[in-house]
Image (cartoon, helix red, strand yellow):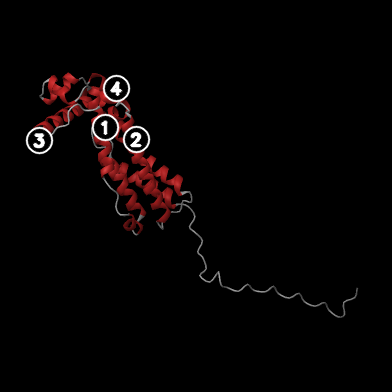
Amino acid sequence: MTSERRGLAPRKQPRQVRAELTRQRILDAAARVFAEYGYAAGTTNRIAERAGVSIGSLYQYYPNKDAILVELLTRHLDAGMAATPPDQDDQLSAPLEGIMRFHVRRAIDNHRDDPQLLRVMMEQGPRTPAILERVAHSELERIAYARELLSSHPEVRVTDTDTAARLLVSTIEMVVHKMMATFDQTDTTRLENELVAMLTHYLTSGPAPAPEHPDAATAPVSAPAPTPAPDSDTRV
C-alpha cells in the first residue's frame, strides 16, 4: 500500500458495537462540519468537538480529515450502487416514462444530503485510485443496463442505443448532481418531472419502425406487363 493510500484509509476497523457507534458519530459530525464550514475550515478539532470525542480518539479511527471525507464519499457511492434496478424483463412491459421516473427518482434520493456537503464531496474530496475505480465500475454497469433496456423496449425509437445509453446515464447523474448541489431550494418534484419528460421525449421521438408485411418473404413477384404488339397497319 502506498503512503497516499495509507494516509486516506481508516486506521481502525470497529469490531465492537461501541466502537462502531463512535465511528458513526465521527462520520455524522464530519458531514455536518463540512456542510457548515466547508472543507478548508472543517478541521479535525471541530469534527471531534461536534462528535463529542477527544481528538486522540478521532485519530484512532482516521489519520486526517481527508480520510474522513473519503469515507463519506464512499458511503455516498455505495448508496447509489445499492439501489438495484427492477428486473429487466419486467421493465420491457412497463411504460418507458415510468422506467425513466424510477431512475431519476433514485438519483434524486441519493442526492438529498446537504447541498454544501455534496459540493465538498464531489468537488474537493480526494480522488483515490479505489474511489476512481469504484466510480468507473458503477458507471459501466449502469451503461450496460441502459443499453440492454434501450435495445429491447418497444417504445424506444433511437437507433444508436450505445450512445443513447451513455447519454442517459450521464445526463441523469450530472443534471441531478448539479441541480441538487448548486441550488439550495431545488424543487425536486419539478426537477423529476422535467427530467423525465426530456429523457422520454428523446428516446421516443424518432421515426417508428416500418411495419413488415408478414407475407413479404413468400409473396410471388408479379411479372411485368407484356409489351403490346405493333399494329399491322403501321407504316415504317
Q: Amino acid under label 4?
A: Ser
Number of the front mark, 1 or 2: 2
User: Mark 4 or mark 3, which is nearer the start of the sequence?
Assistant: 4
User: Mark 3 or mark 2, which is nearer the start of the sequence?
Assistant: 3
Q: Amino acid under label 2?
A: Glu
Q: Quadrant of the C terminus?
A: bottom right
Percent across and percent down for residue 160 are: 48, 48
**In the rendering, which numbered label is found on residue 73?**
1
User: Mark 2 or mark 4, which is nearer the start of the sequence?
Assistant: 4
Q: CA distance from mark 4 to mark 2?
A: 18 Å
Residue at the limit of the structure toward the right, as seen here? 236
Name the residue tied to disc 4: 3
At label 2, counting other C-alpha atoms closer than 10 Å, the crowd grade (few under 14, some 14-19, many 20 or more) is: few
At label 3, counting other C-alpha atoms closer than 10 Å, the crowd grade (few under 14, some 14-19, many 20 or more) is: few
Q: Nearer the viewer, residue 84 or 224?
A: 84
Q: Nearer the viewer, residue 39 or 207?
A: 39
Q: Amino acid under label 1?
A: Leu
- Residues at circles 1 and 4 in contact by the CB criterion of under 8 Å: no
| Image-quadrant location for residue 32 | top left
Percent across and percent down for residue 207 are: 49, 55
